[in-house]
Image: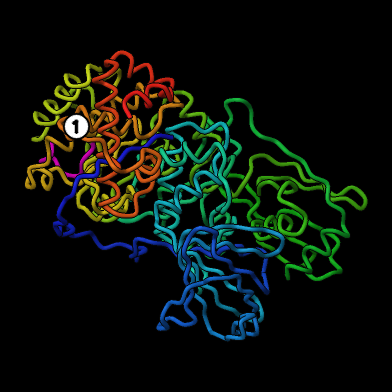
Amino acid sequence: MKSCLAAILLAIVPVAAPVRAADPAPHRGTTLRVGLWTLWHDKEITVSPTPGTKASLRLCEACPAVSLAKSEQIHANGDRLKLTSGSQAQTVSLAGAITLAAHGESLTLHTPLRISARNGELILTVTLPVEMYVERVVASESGPADSAESLKALAIVVRSFALHQQHGHAEYDLCDSTHCQLLHWGSLGSRRAAAHAATLATAGETLWYHGQRAAAWFHQNCGGRTASPDEVWAGAANRGPMPWLASRADPYCTTGGAREWSASLSFADLTAVLAGAGLARPGWETLTVSRRGGSGRAAMLLIGASEVNAEEFRLAVGRAMGWGKILSNWFEVTRQGDQFIFHGRGSGHGVGLCQAGAAEMAEKGREAGQILAQYFPGAGAVDETTGLAWQTVRGQDFVLETLTAKDAGFLPQMNQALAEAEERSGLRVEGTFTVRAFRSTEAFREGTLVPGWVAAFTEENWVGTQPLATLRARKLLGPVLRHEFLHVLVERQAGANAPLWLREGLVESWAGGTTSRRAPPGLKLEQAEAWLADAASEAESEAAHEVAGWYAGRLLERFGRAQVLVWLRDGVPATALATIR
């Protein structure tokens, strides 16, 4: 994954948010409180500062932060916390790079953590930016069949689920288990890059239906027909009508045949599961489907004399015996001696987006908007804050995405900036790329998670910018766009071994920022590389870009453009660096 930042200082200009239509109470913050390790019910945890970093601890909301210099064990003592240092507290708040250890697992966090206790168990709450949460869930919940467009659709549904609904937790907004949406805290492996791209491309987008925020769910495989909420969850009808979630046929899910499954569960095991979940007391003898929903799924079961919601039954079996037993509520059940035999189809509750069908639609060339239209008819993706739909305007070899039609007036300047970038670099755009102009500085920061001093952001074929009108007012529109378009051109040529300093330096040199400097920089190239990847301040970013531009400019002067482009693909040899040093 390659990303580049245009480190151009831009004054912050407040922008008034457009008036929204009345809608259900959405999540109002730019962050989410997420329960950590919610299935473990830990009673103690060890918190440690990550070596080489700073971490701090507070023993109450109003207490001053103190340095966390060594490991601390935190125990749940009723509804209070006890630390090995002897301190006691109602809550403990940690910031910085913190390493946690509990139940044999270790995890390093770089986001704020709050620890409290209830009934002798720890409650761990992590504060995440909304877009970081969405990215992690998309990476955790997606599969190898997904591609760019199905991942974009999933990102929009994940964001909608998080922001548009109450999830029943007192201490945090969402948990990290499938009760809400699965979130893996550790390494996300090969899915991380694709999830990041999908999240970035849909930043801030959620589902709305006729001017109102829409509830959204997703599942693995609908078996050929989705379910409506009221046939799955007791009390769903109390939410009011949700026409965008009506049960409907899904021909895409069954392109390769419907997913069928079977399971055999013993009478003794089911008796224990149902008693443990409080669904049916021991002594029952029969288990039948008493009512089905419009999709054909079991809605209610008759277990002895007790009527049990089929979804509650499925979840109880899953929690006690594993999720590979009863995969969905679309099943028939018979008894053979001591065994209950289930035959079914699909996987998951069946409401909303079918991931299998979405992946197939993307494989057939459908875009994210078409996928959402299949599973949420009448609803569409719009900007969460304003309720406005993103408009697309085609430029020269790029597509401009904007919330205001006035931005189309900037196309001549954008086309000129691209022409200048191609002329200065000698490179040409192949295909098209996307430029998304955010409605405000705050929306740009929240969507891209870049620092406030950054005016624009480029990642491969995607460019995000602060408002074009703001850039023009600061006389930065041309320079910023030219800089970002150079990034697009350079990144398309860069190979896996190309150092970040060379990619950034070529842009700086061709943009005209450092070519006049002849004195060698005092900052070492290795330090510049580190600051380019993660600058702690605007000053560090500026210094790193200056050094990168100096080295790239000297390489161009000494060896010529053709040779430097070879190194952009293969990496710069040490002998070449020694020559210019």
The amino acid pointed to by label 1 is: Arg
Q: Which residue is mark 1?
A: 518
**Which residue range is magenta in the image?**
401-408
The residue carrying pointer 1 sits among few (fewer than 14), some (14 to 19) or many (20 or more) residues within 10 Å by Cα, namely few
Q: Is residue 64 left or right of residue 44?
A: left
Q: Residue furthest right?
A: 337
Q: Residue at x 41, y 81 (%)?
A: 64
Q: Quadrant of residue 524?
A: top left
Please provide percent x and percent y for residue 283.
86, 69
Q: Percent from the top left, x then y, of residue 418?
A: 17, 25
The answer to which quarter of the image holds residue 185 is bottom right
In the image, taking residue 369 as reference, residue 174 lies left or right, namely right
* Residue 444 counted in the magenta span: no
Let me know if residue 50 appears in the view: yes
- Residue drawn at point x = 25 percent, y = 17 percent: 428
Is residue 182 visible in the rendered image? The answer is no
Q: Is residue 3 above or below residue 109?
A: above
Q: How many marks?
A: 1
> Which image quadrant: the C terminus?
top left
Of 196 and 564, nearer the camera is: 564
Q: Nearer the viewer, residue 7 or 267?
A: 7
User: Horizontally, is 572 left or right of 414 in the view?
Assistant: right
Q: Residue at x 41, y 53 (%)?
A: 160
Is residue 267 positioned above or below 44 on the image? Answer: above
- Judging depth in this view, the residue of 52 and 355 nearest the camera is 52
Q: Mark 1: which secondary structure?
A: loop
Q: Where's residue 30, x and y in %?
A: 34, 61
> Could you tell me which residue is drawn at 71 percent across and 41 percent down?
344
User: Residue 533 at what x, y percent from top left?
Assistant: 38, 43
The quadrant in which the N terminus is found is: top left
